[in-house]
Amino acid sequence: MWHKIKASLYRDTKELFRNMTLLTSMLLPLLLAGMFHFTVDSITVDEIEAGLVDRMMLIQSYLVIGITLMSVLTFNITTSMAEENEKEYFQHFIHTERDYQATIWSKVILYSVVSVFTLIIVMIIFNPPVAFGVYDVIGIACIFIVFILLGIAIGLTAKSVSQTSVFIIPFMIFIVMTPMAEVIFGVYNEVAISLLWFNLLYLNMMIYEGQVWQGMLGNAIYIGISLLLVVFSYRHKKQKI
């Protein structure tokens, strides 16, 4: 199966450099990181406000991580799969179920590598005053897995590129943009805190603040639900292969 993955990977890599939509999806997190970087540099606080500023920096850090992974990883996996669904490219390449699995694996590998490099560059640009520990890195890896699974599930479901926005935007608003409520209305905002146990980024902020097992349990639930979505979507798609 590996030679089929390599063939599909070569094809997807060429498509990545040809498709401006996929390339420009990497610009948003870079611009956001630059904007937040200047925000960090311009902040001067006293001891009373230090705790609130630390909270804001934590929120911005996870916002950058969430937007980077959603726009580069989930969006690109979904869009590339939806484009093949719409134009039926896969029919010229796929002869068996294993061939279709190879196309999925190639996209996961390609955009995972691109996302990791983009995230590293973004965090270097942002340079937040937040020190992530081992559990935090594990939590970020869980976010990574969830966004991969969401990308695959939506890519299997969407029949065209235009449909991808219908599926991605609700996830973008709830998972990625919910912490913006604290940025806009102030830290520890009641509306945002009420979603603490339901939002993926907030669950990982809990890990950073010491509630490790609660946050990890939430991550495991998210991964489980995302995996079920992939299995359901794949079985539905399998009938058409």
Image (cartoon, rainbow, N blue to C red):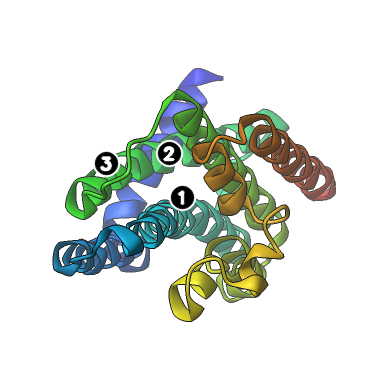
Callout 1 environment at 10 Å: few (<14), some (14 to 19), or many (20+)? Answer: many
Residue 40, x across and y down, in percent: 21, 62
Left or right of 7 on screen, residue 31:
left
Spatial separation of the CA atoms under disc 2 and disc 3: 12 Å
Q: Which residue is mark 3?
A: 120
Left or right of 67 on screen, residue 31:
left
**Mark 2 vs 3: CB contact within 8 A:** no
Q: Which residue is mark 1?
A: 73
- In what quadrant of the picture does the N terminus appear? top right
Quadrant hosting residue 81: bottom right
- Please say whether residue 91 is visible from this viewpoint: no
- In what quadrant of the picture does the C terminus appear? top right
Residue 172, x across and y down, in percent: 57, 66
**Mark 1 vs 2: CB contact within 8 A:** yes
Spatial separation of the CA atoms under disc 3 and disc 1: 14 Å
Foreground of the two, 213 or 228: 213
Q: Is residue 133 above or below residue 41?
A: above
